[in-house]
């Protein structure tokens, strides 16, 4: 079954990030999370933001999501300035952030209920369709705690996809999973991205993961958070994270990442 | 079945030993009536409907006061968690009053409301309102912020977030607050009924009180058993379904 025939996909959006700066001030320290960052994400592009902890990549994701606001600069989606969270830009968090009081289907339905123009049956159909897409249609009545880590993130993915956002923001969604499960999900996410055409911003500190998934990998450096370098990944899809071609790219990027870290080595990125 | 047999064996043994101790004259029947005596009283009280009528009076008082506490306490708890100013005022007041056993209100309640149902109502509310409010507030403060963030990105705002995310996420705390509130309300009402004579209805506490006045320890014992029974039943009927739901959804309760 071709999903795009069953459920129409809205066209992916273009993101414009211009001169964004963000500083967090706490009694103990001041962190320049982002310093004059500019970036354009094409319609339907899969972009990966990589960098060591504290380089502002998650902050940028939160700003695009509308959960945080920049001190300076602006972010716009298809030319419209982002003023807050919107159902056209959904976030998939590092922890699944699924609601334990709802079953799997209820979780996927949550965002759909907030989307106007769908009746009850249509909502249920859409939710089932996405559960099927992530291979969990048999678990629609299961409680969240009954699922494994990988299944939880699959449900979270279905929940973010169901309201048909134009932009999908993913904040280290696979960081807490074991390698086997992660590799399965790399396959799933590439397949779904190709079928559903979304603009995806994917934050990770795992270089191989970034190369495996991204059309483009953006390397950030910390203190203050800036874009250090960008890499275009010209590899055919679906990509296998263990392939040699992929390793060539990631070796390259890892070298740059080490330079980023050299001045004050605080944390070792994978 | 095995669990039932163990429980049945335990209680049969307990009652048999008790009966034996009284029959052998080791325990005086004036101080500790035999279970058979207590049983006889209970049967007669059921037959002349005093037990039924008193239980109905008591339960009506309890339910009214408790429902009022729930309806006011949960929203108050939400406001408490949402607004610092509410926490600093009503929250602090509640925290203080929660430490006060609510039967302490009896003298004032009598003065304010007289020997009326309102006095009982007031004492029950003072017993349960604060713990329900505080548990709700505590529950809300323990909701992981990521739930609200996730809900916001999906387009949930304001009241919708509170009703569909914050409130259900704090359910485990709210239910334990409800149980605590129920226990406090039950204790308060019994104390109040023993302490205050009210002309509009003769509750279980009053029966117990008159049993004491008449030196009828079988009545006292019998009423005590009924009070325990009602407490157990309420727990099973009112809270067990909630707790089963919580355990199933959250995956808790299995150690």
Image: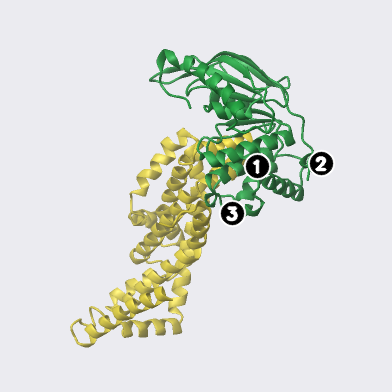
Residue positioned 52% across, 27% down in the render: A205
Q: Classify residue A88 as left or right of residue A20.
A: right
Q: Which residue position is annotated with label 1?
A: A158
**Which chain has been coloured green in this picture?**
A
How far is mark 3 from mark 2, CA to CA? 29 Å
Q: Which residue is mark 3?
A: A142
Tell me if mark 2 has few (under 14), some (14-19) or many (20+) residues whose alpha carbon lies within 10 angstroms of its own.
Answer: few
Which is nearer the eye, B216 or A156?
A156
Dot 2: what SS? helix
Say what secondary structure mark 1 lies in. Answer: helix
Specify the chain shown as yellow. B
> Which image quarter: residue A166?
top right
A56, B223: nearer the viewer: A56
- Same chain under badges 3 and 1? The reply is yes
**Marks 3 & 1, CB-CB < 8 Å contact:** no
Q: Position of residue B245 (x, y in %)?
A: 53, 57
């Amino acid at each position: 079954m071709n999903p795009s025939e069953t459920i129409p996909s809205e066209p992916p959006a273009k993101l414009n990030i211009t001169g964004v700066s963000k500083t967090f001030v706490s009694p103990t320290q001041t962190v320049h999370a982002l310093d004059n960052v500019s970036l354009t994400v094409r319609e339907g592009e899969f972009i990966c933001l990589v960098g060591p902890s504290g380089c502002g990549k998650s902050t940028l994701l939160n700003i695009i999501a509308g959960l945080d606001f920049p001190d300076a600069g602006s972010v716009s989606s298809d030319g419209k300035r982002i003023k807050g969270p919107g159902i056209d830009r959904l976030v998939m968090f590092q922890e699944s952030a699924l609601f334990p009081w709802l079953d799997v289907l209820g979780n996927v339905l949550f965002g759909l209920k907030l989307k106007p123009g769908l009746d009850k049956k249509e909502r249920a159909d859409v939710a089932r369709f996405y559960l099927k897409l992530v291979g969990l249609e048999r678990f629609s009545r299961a409680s969240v705690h009954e699922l494994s880590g990988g299944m939880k993130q699959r449900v979270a993915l279905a929940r973010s996809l169901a309201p048909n956002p134009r932009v999908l923001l993913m904040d280290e969604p696979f960081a807490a999973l074991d390698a086997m499960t992660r590799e399965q999900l790399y396959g799933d996410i590439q397949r779904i991205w190709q079928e559903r055409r979304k603009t995806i911003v994917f934050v990770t500190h795992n270089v191989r993961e970034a190369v495996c998934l991204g059309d483009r990998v953006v390397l950030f450096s910390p203190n203050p958070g800036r874009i250090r370098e960008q890499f275009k990944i010209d590899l055919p899809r679906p990509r296998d994270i263990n392939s040699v071609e992929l390793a060539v790219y990631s070796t390259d990027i890892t070298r740059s990442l080490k330079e980023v870290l050299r001045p004050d080595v605080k944390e070792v990125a994978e | 079945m095995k669990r039932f047999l163990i429980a049945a064996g335990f209680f049969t043994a307990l009652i048999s030993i008790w009966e034996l101790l009284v029959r052998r004259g080791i325990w005086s029947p004036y101080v500790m009536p035999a279970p058979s005596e207590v049983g006889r009283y209970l049967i007669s009280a059921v037959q002349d409907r005093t037990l039924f009528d008193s239980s109905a009076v008591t339960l009506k008082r309890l339910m009214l006061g408790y429902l009022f506490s729930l309806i006011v306490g949960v929203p108050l708890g939400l406001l408490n968690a949402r607004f610092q100013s509410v926490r600093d005022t009503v929250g602090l007041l509640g925290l203080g009053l929660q430490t006060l056993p609510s039967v302490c209100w009896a003298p004032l309640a009598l003065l304010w409301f007289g020997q009326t149902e309102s006095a009982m109502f007031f004492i029950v509310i003072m017993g349960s309102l604060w713990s329900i409010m505080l548990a709700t507030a505590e529950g809300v403060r323990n909701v992981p912020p990521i739930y609200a963030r996730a809900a916001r990105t999906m387009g949930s705002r304001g009241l919708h977030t509170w009703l569909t995310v914050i409130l259900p996420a704090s359910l485990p705390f709210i239910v334990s607050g409800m149980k605590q509130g129920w226990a406090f309300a039950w204790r308060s009402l019994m104390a109040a009924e023993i302490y205050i004579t009210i002309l509009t209805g003769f509750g279980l506490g009053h029966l117990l009180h008159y049993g004491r006045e008449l030196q009828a320890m079988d009545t006292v014992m019998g009423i005590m058993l009924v009070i325990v029974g009602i407490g157990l039943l309420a727990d099973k009927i009112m809270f067990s379904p909630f707790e089963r739901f919580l355990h199933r959804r959250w995956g808790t309760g299995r150690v």
